[in-house]
Amino acid sequence: MTFSIAILGSTGSIGKSALKALKKDKKFKVKLLTTNKNANKIFKQAIQFKVKNVIITNEIKYKNYKSLFEKNNIKLYLGLHNIKKILRRKISYTINAISGIEGLEPSLNIIPYTENFLIANKESIICGWKFIHYKLKKYNTKFIPIDSEHFSIWKLIQDEPKKEIKKVILTASGGPFLNKSLKDIRNISPKKALNHPTWKMGKKISIDSSNMMNKVFELIEAKKIFDLSVKNISILIHPTSYIHAIVIFKNNLIKILAHEANMIIPISNALNINYISDQKKTEFNLKKLNNMKFIKPNYKKFPILSIINKIPKNDTYFETILITLNDSLVEKYLKGEINYISIQKNLLNLIESTYLKKYYKLKPKNIYDIKKMITKTNNYLNLNLKYYNE
């Protein structure tokens, strides 16, 4: 039996991991690949996996590479709105590995055309879970999260009644600055901030991991995906990144899921691929199990975690504003426009501003409301951005 699959964002870290998993299993046929502007990479992927449909969202790259794709009998499309044109009937699987809020609209566009929707795009879930969930139910599409933490929770609570869940614990590595003070990292370079101790990830998520904003996002995701209260979710620092989630049940059972820090593992398991790594390190690691270490996060060292106390019970514009502020600040940091400490200082101050707080009791009615709020938030950030030295 052959399974058809589309990968949105195939040239990013998650997309590349997905293709590595598929390389080991011949029963999958890749129907569609997409990228923003990494045209050369996606061309090589299309040739290797014999893909006939490719989407590029960058107009310049599209124009420059159109003839190359056509010469190789590959249909090249400009823009993710073409998903509906390419997929005329339901395919078996879709993986959304697009980075950023740009992943929301294609999520909504492709759900009607896929039997199983796998996602690693945090921003889509955080800002638009209500719309995603509606589409999943309407088109009878199965949802599987493939972030290592959320896949682990999903796996641990399968066939378990929600009412029996007492606590969900997300684990965090603590990033590259776990043993450094805020003073030490005030002006730390992006190169050092990107040097994650256990994971190989994209630039944006690596910065988010270094100050634990990534864990704030993951907590919001868990709240939405599994319909949990914030008070029933907590975070523990686990430097080796071997344990990915812990679920405590009311019957006193505790379930723990462990695997090496390799995204191919949750992806291949979500796709039911019997992926066997060539690396011995993915085998049972007794040393790591015997040296498990868990630390309660220090909010003084990771002040961004204080945002958890501000998360509203119901969906509002808060999530969109939070995502937008962070995305823009990380981008400015990577471009050298602000220093490291200015990411969290600006974020923590602006999220409390009177102008933005007035939207925390309002909720978006559709994706266009979210887009408008992104523009408003970015405009407000650019007018009020500060460079902090303390």
Image (tube, rainbow, N blue to C red):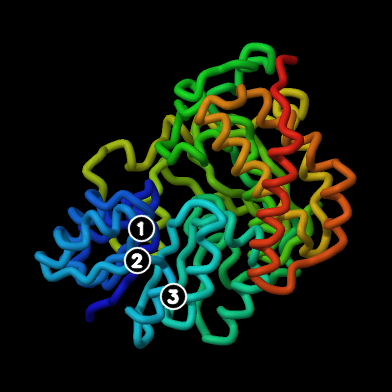
* Residue matched to label 1: 59
The answer to which of marks 2 and 1 sits earlier in the sequence is 1
Seen from the viewer's position, the closer of residues 311 and 346 is 346
Residue 316 image offset from top left, x and y in percent: 79, 62
As drawn, 179 above or below 114: above
Mark 3 residue type:
Asn
| Of the image marks 3 and 2, the number of the one nearer the N terminus | 2
Tell me if residue 259 comes above or below residue 187 in the rendering.
below
Q: Disc 2 vs disc 1: Cβ atoms closer than 8 Å?
A: yes
Quarter-of-image position of residue 301: top right
Q: 83 left or right of 311?
A: left
Crowding around mark 3 (Cα neighbors within 10 Å: few <14, some 14 to 19, many 20+) is many
Q: Position of residue 365 (x, y in %)?
A: 73, 73
Query: What is the x, y in percent for residue 115?
Result: 43, 80
| Residue occupied by mark 2 | 78
64 over 188 or under it: above or below: below
